[in-house]
Amino acid sequence: MDWFVESTWKTVLAFASVLIYARLLGKEQISQLTFYDYVTGITFGNLAGQLAYSEDNRVLEHFWILTLFVGIAFFIAYVTTHSRPLRKMFEGEPTIVIHNGKILEQNMYKMRYNMENLLTQLREKDIFRISDVEYAILETNGGLSVLPKSQKRTLTPADLNIPTSYEGLSTEIIVDGVVIYPNLEQNNLDEQWLIRELQKHGINSPREVYFASLESDGTL
């Protein structure tokens, strides 16, 4: 049973370290990954794996290495937040690959970005003709931002001078049968109002509701 206890506490330590340190490094580790974030994430996971499999006499060593690595990554994240040149050095910068319907081959070559990737990402934006594109910009996370030419864009109410009313964001009121009381109070509402509104839908208790939201016009 020694191996069971040993492997269990090492794995728990590695998992807790990854969870805590990942939260410290921020959400950018899991969204909008740049090349730097990608490399950092792989190394982070590898060091955590070594911690989980390390021998007893090397646990503290591997834990220190993981902590030091996170400290360096956190420091770089802090520095790059306050220095644009350093941010460009570590994370790169967006690159224009299409301008006024013309492919900028030199920029694509510098980024080692091929036509298959470009065409695929354009199709994902519902664009099938390069000549319809005013600008296409390859972002630092590998995503493609596309601005269609003005005559190829979807019409909006503003284009037709049609007035629209404010929509805003909906507010969570009930999630998994639990009332979010701070959100009720924020909108100057109480539980009695909520019960009355639920009864209009044939519901007698918030516990029967999987999800309910308050729209910006006051309707539930």
Image (cartoon, rainbow, N blue to C red):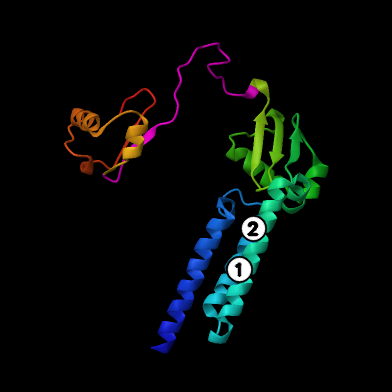
Element type where label 1 sits in the image: helix
Q: Residue 74 carries which label?
A: 2
| Residue 100 is a magenta residue | no
Indicate the quadrant containing the C terminus: top left, top right, bottom left or bottom right.
top left
Q: Where is residue 26 in the image (x, y as percent from the top left)?
A: 57, 53
Name the residue rendered at 30%, 29% in the picture. Answer: 189
Q: Disc 1 versus disc 2: distance between alpha carbons?
A: 10 Å
Amino acid beneath label 2: Phe
Q: Where is residue 197 in the image (x, y as percent from the top left)?
A: 23, 29
Q: Is residue 39 visible?
A: no
Q: Position of residue 50 (x, y in %)?
A: 58, 76
Q: Mark 1 points at which residue?
A: 67
Name the residue rendered at 55%, 73% in the picture. Answer: 49
Amino acid beneath label 1: Thr
For this rendering, which residue is in front, 113 or 48?
Answer: 48
Q: Is residue 216 visible?
A: yes
For this rendering, which residue is in front, 201 or 193?
Answer: 193
- The residue range painted magenta reads 152-177
Looking at the rendering, which quadrant does residue 175 occupy?
Answer: top left
Element type where label 2 sits in the image: helix
